[in-house]
Image: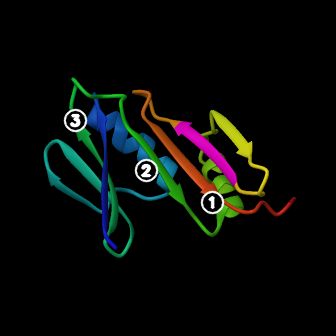
Amino acid sequence: MELFAGMPVSDLERAKEWYSRLLGAEPSFLPNDVEAVWTLEDQRHVYVVKDDQRAGGGHLTLFVTDFDERTQAISRRDIEPTTDETYENGVRKVEYHDPDGNQLGIGGGPSEEA
């Protein structure tokens, strides 16, 4: 399976800085002057694209096997989740909102505390 998921943003430079902190790396490549792409795993990418009309309307959730480690690392980079939920089955989900209001969730679990 391949993934190429995008988030529309109003300010590409601001988005590159924020997503680099969120994802823990600089963009993997810059295909043109309005996009920045992060490769999460082989053939799995998240990108931001300058699109003033749609900025803030993105919604994406990634499920990871290293939930606690990943979310703690994000906190160390000074980004805190806007929500933090634990579902009845022990699965956890946090949501982060970029400066435009796009929502990027990270899910995993069950939590180590469950």
Instruction: Find the magenta span and give its range.
Output: 92-96
37 relative to 31 in the view: left or right = right
Q: If the image is split into quadrants, where does the C terminus sit?
A: bottom right
**Helix, strand or loop for the magenta stretch, by majority:** strand
Q: Return the residue found at the far front.
A: 88
Count of numbered marks: 3
Q: Return the residue found at the far right.
A: 113
58 relative to 84 in the view: left or right = left
Q: Residue at x 44, y 28 (%)?
A: 101
Q: Which residue is mark 2?
A: 20
Name the N-terminal-most of marks 2 and 3.
Answer: 2
Q: Secondary structure at mark 3?
A: strand
63 relative to 1 in the view: left or right = right
Looking at the rendered structure, the kind of residue marked 2 is Ser
- Which corner quadrant of the image does residue 30 belong to? bottom left
Q: Residue at x 35, y 34 (%)?
A: 14
Q: Position of residue 60 (x, y in %)?
A: 44, 46
Q: Residue at x 55, y 39 (%)?
A: 96
Crowding at dot 2, Cα within 10 Å, few <14 / some 14-19 / many 20+, comes out as some
Q: Position of residue 67 (x, y in %)?
A: 66, 61
Q: Which residue is mark 3?
A: 50
Q: Position of residue 55 (x, y in %)?
A: 30, 28
